Amino acid sequence: MNEAKKRIDEIRQKRDISIKTLDFLLSTEDEEVITYLRDSAREAADKIYGKQVFIRGLIEFTNYCKNDCKYCGIRRSNSRADRYRLTEEEILSCCENGYGLGFRTFVLQGGEDMYFTDEKICHLLKSIKEKYPDCALTLSIGEKNKESYQAYFDAGADRYLLRHETADEMHYNRLHPPELSFKNRIRCLYDLKEIGYQTGCGFMVGSPGQTTESIYKDLQFIRQFLPHMAGIGPFIPQKDTPFGKEPAGSLKMTLRLLSIIRLIHPHVLLPATTALGTIHPKGRELGILAGANVVMPNLSPVLVRKKYALYDNKICTGDEAAECRQCMEKRMEAVGYHIVTARGDYI
Ligand code: SAH
């Protein structure tokens, strides 16, 4: 046990992890070690962010997508996906609703939908920013060229989420069709950071073909890139995709990785994701206790919620935003944390 504790303390001090320690921490069944890892990570988060949990209002504004990622339920070749896109008015009304509930960050996420030209996105960003100048705007609409990213930034976007998905190029190629490349994904992330966005990367835990080695590469990428945010959630199969029969990523592995990431990069904004809440009824609470400090309740209109089906059995698809907000409040209070009405910027 002392040896194990020493290894965990070392991650914290060096902000790095060896593949040997990673392998050990992902496979150990020693409860004392697991508890020590979790408590060290939570302590690191408390030191910077205290008992606060930031909320982001997620608006899933289109599920049209030109890409064909093998894990994703809204991939273009899924003919069973029921497609929708929200109008600017509908999106603004989601924001209005969210603002009233105390949200000060809106995350606009969608597939790569060519209908939303740069002009339309910029118009949308300006309209939201004009009405809610005190709110942060996050975009999550995939890979674009640098000029587009710059235009969105100039129109008012503050943050951008683009998970790198995996930092192992071979693994990347197994998850994606040939027209998508790891190099371009990484190029996008560096462009975003250079422009001045608070930038988020991230990966799925337990995606088909993932090895300890690929996770090690993910951690090295995070260490090197130092993102402002990192989205880590379990892979969950969606039945109409090529990975529909693959097993989901595990709760235990996701929680341990959240903790390790917190120790490697203590300041990072780390959500306890909806996917984590989907694989376990207390997934998000456990995520917070493992070192996460963000939750992202859904603000999308209930009528379209079910249609943004990246994976099967997604939770909270039937609840109004107000219910989600309240439910989240209770869940966080139950584990000793509280939601704050603030932009929740990177410290
Ligand atoms: N089109 C945007 C948004 C993608 S959806 C983009 O390319 O960034 C947001 C994230 O959901 C993805 O980055 C992916 O990591 C995750 N996701 C997609 N399918 C998933 C699945 N089956 N299980 C778990 N997470 C999934």
Image: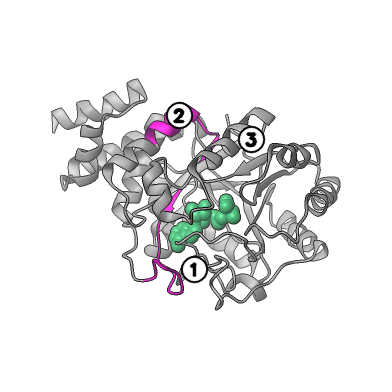
Disc 2 residue type (three-letter): Lys
Beta carbon of the mark 1 residue lies under 8 A of ligand 1: no
Estimate the x, y position of residue 31 in percent, counting from the top left.
Answer: 18, 46
Q: Quadrant of the N terminus?
A: top left
Q: Quadrant of the C terminus?
A: top right
Beta carbon of the mark 2 residue lies under 8 A of ligand 1: no
The one nearer the camera, 235 or 9, is 235
Other residues around mark 3 within 10 Å, as few (<14) / some (14–19) / many (≥20): many
Q: Residue at x 46, y 74 (%)?
A: 240
* Quadrant in the picture for residue 28: top left
Tell me the magenta residue range.
219-244
The residue that disc 2 covers is 47
Q: Residue at x 69, y 52 (%)?
A: 102
Above or below, 91 against 172 in this view is below
Could you say whether the residue bearing mark 2 is in a helix, strand or loop? Answer: helix
Which tag, 1 or 2, sits closer to the chain's start?
Answer: 2
* Quadrant in the picture for residue 190: top right
Disc 1 residue type (three-letter): Ile
Tell me the mark number nearer the camera, choosing from 1 and 2.
1
Other residues around mark 2 within 10 Å, as few (<14) / some (14–19) / many (≥20): few
Q: Looking at the rendered structure, which numbered label has been put on residue 192?
A: 3
Estimate the x, y position of residue 84 in percent, counting from the top left.
Answer: 68, 71
The one nearer the camera, 292 or 232, is 232
Q: Residue at x 27, y 24 (%)?
A: 10
Label 3 with label 1: CB-CB less than 8 Å: no
Estimate the x, y position of residue 273 in percent, counting from the top left.
Answer: 48, 54
Q: Looking at the rendered structure, which numbered label has been put on residue 24?
A: none
Tell me: 29 left or right of 172: left
Disc 3 residue type (three-letter): Leu
